[in-house]
Structure formats: C-alpha cells, structure tokens
Image: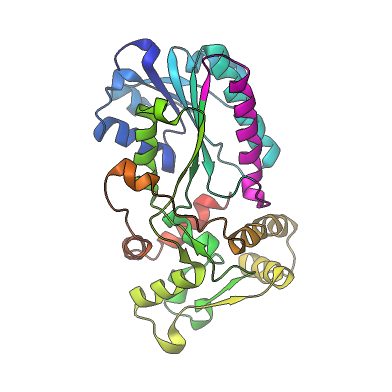
Amino acid sequence: MSTSNSKICLTGATGGLGSRVLHHLLHTLSVPPSSLVISSQNPSPSSSASGIETRHGDFLNPSTLPSAFAGAATLLLVSYPSIAHALRVTAHKNAIDAAVRAGVTHIAYTSLAFAGDSQAAVMQAHIETEEYLKRTCAGREGMHYTIIREGIYCESWALYLGFFDPGKAVGEGEWRVVRVPEGADRGVAWVGRDELGEGTARILVQKEKFADQTVLLSGGAAVSLRGVGEMISGIMGWQGEEAVHVEELGRERWVDATVEMKTGKKEDVETRDFMEKWYTTYPAVEKGELDVVDPLLERLLGRKLQSMEESLREQLKDVGGAKESIGQYAK
C-alpha cells in the first residue's frame, strides 16, 4: 500500500470511532502512515508528526473537500456528528460528491445498526445517505461503496437506559429507577467501540470483499435494557430494593418526566424537541431492530467479542463514565 492511488483517506479520525479505526490501521494491521491521509475540519499537528498527511477538509465547506481527498482510492466517510437531519445529510452529500470529483473509487460509510426502513429519528439521515451513496455509485463505472451499519456502542448504554447516571444512584435510591417509554425487554446487540474500529479497519484493507454491500457489525449477544440494569446492579452490589428498577412509562409520560429530570422544569422547548425525537428510538428497539446478532465482526477479528457485562465492569470503575456517555452521544 505504498502508491498514491491506493491511499485511504479517513474522516472523523479524531472522534470516538474514527480514532480507533486509525489506531488499528496503524498498529494492528501495520498500514504504513504514508498510505493514509486524514481529512479534518481542524487538522491536528500530531497526525502530521506521526507521518500521516493531514489536510483541511470541512464537510460544510465543500470547496475544501476535493483537495482533501485527492490521491486516495478509498474514503472512510464517518457520519457527521450532529442529530440535525438536514445538516447531516448535506454534509454527507458534500463529501460523496467531492469524493467523485477527486477520483475516489470506493467509499465506506459508517451508518447505524437500525433497520433500513426504521422510523427512528436517529436513523433517518443514515437512510437518506445510504440511498444517495448507492445511486452515486450505480451511475459510475468503477465506483463502489460499502455501507457499514455500526452496532450500538456498549459505551452509549446510559443514553438508551433513560439517561441513567450511576454516579447519582450511588447515594440516592430514586436515581435507581430507570424510566424508558417502551422496549425494556427487547435485546440490543451492544458492541465495543474499539472492536468496531478494528472491524471497520479490516473492511477498509479488504474492501473488494465488501464492495457494493451493506454489512452489519454487531456484538456477539443481545442484552435488553432491563438486562443492562440487572448487570449494573450486580456489578455495583445493589440488591433487592436497592437494585436498578426499569419501568416503562409510555411516550407522553416519559417525555414529560425526562424533560423535568434533565432541566428541573416542567417545560423546556429545546429539550422537549430532542426527547420527542429520541423517543422514536424505543419503538425501533421494541420491534427488535437492534437485537440482530451478526457473526461478521467476530469473523473479521478472529476472536470472541467482549461481552456487555465485561464492558460495563470496565466502565463502572469510574461511575462518571455514564455522564461522559450521555454528553458524547446526546448531540
């Protein structure tokens, strides 16, 4: 992988997933730095210092992108970090169009593990991007895509578990009541972000095997939201009435209660708008969209994946990890 036309251009390389992809390309798969390019809105000197060419590329300033992607055969398009639908789709389309102009021949896009016809708000920009990417490649000879539906991060559990904060729960029993609107007993195939990063890196270096495919990288087992609560109770040593209790409230009661929990007020327009959108995640959970266990990631890594309980044990060594999870993913 030493010639310029075999280079891989990475976007999102400083983020939670992208940084792990970069790590595994360099340190697990021994891809030479000269075969990598990083496109970043705010280029980091540390990347250049490691021998990787770093270029300025801003998804929302499309004129910067063709030069950022120039000379790369493969583009890893990490989804834009925003829940604003129109903004996210625009960013993705800008990147796809620029990749075509730059001569990229394979785009790998990090989508999400919900169903292709999901009604979950968090999936809508992904669905629109997936369709745009397919249409773009279908109309151009020699242009290929891989859509990687990345599983739900083990590290994002607090967001799905009613914004549960075990730091508060340590001293206050009321905080051990976890409220969700529905879907408490349906599984989620949780998977570690580092393992997703390695799996994605391995797809990039054997892209021909995954050309023009949509693949799912999931965890090795599905665990329900109620099951996660039980695991937390076991890890923290909470038993009986002290254990985490998960209850379903339905849509309206859950939105009202969560707005008040997050703001201390009965009404906050911005928070309510977010919660109304986030609510749509739970009917998708209830339908079983996230409990699909696919063996691909284990095959790519050649080992058994870390379990959700193992991940929680690591995360709960520092109970502040839940707050970090909520702050990172609730954008």
User: Which one is nearer the viewer's eye here, 152 or 83?
Assistant: 152
Way the structure is coloured: rainbow
Q: Quadrant of the N terminus?
A: top left
In the image, taking residue 154 as reference, residue 84 lies left or right, namely: right
Quadrant assignment, res 264: bottom right
Q: Is residue 124 magenta?
A: yes
Q: Is residue 1 magenta?
A: no
Residue at 68% x, 41% y: name it. 85
In the image, taking residue 258 as reference, residue 220 lies left or right, namely: left
Q: Position of residue 80 (x, y in %)?
A: 56, 36
Q: Position of residue 66 (x, y in %)?
A: 54, 15
**Is residue 295 shown above or below 18?**
below
Visible in this render: residue 264? no
Residue at 58% x, 27% y: name it. 59
User: Which one is nearer the viewer's eye here, 70 or 108?
Assistant: 108
User: Which one is nearer the viewer's eye here, 140 or 195?
Assistant: 140
User: Which one is nearer the viewer's eye here, 76 or 274?
Assistant: 76
Quadrant assignment, res 183: bottom right
Q: Which residues are magenta?
A: 117-144
**Is residue 284 shown above or below 117?**
below
Quadrant assignment, res 73: top left
Q: Position of residue 269 (x, y in %)?
A: 75, 57
**Is residue 171 shown above or below 108?**
below
The mark total stands at: 0
In the image, taking residue 197 as reference, residue 122 lies left or right, namely: right
Visible in this render: residue 53? yes
Residue at 64% x, 25% y: name it. 135
Prevalent SS, magenta region: helix
Q: Position of residue 210 (x, y in %)?
A: 44, 31
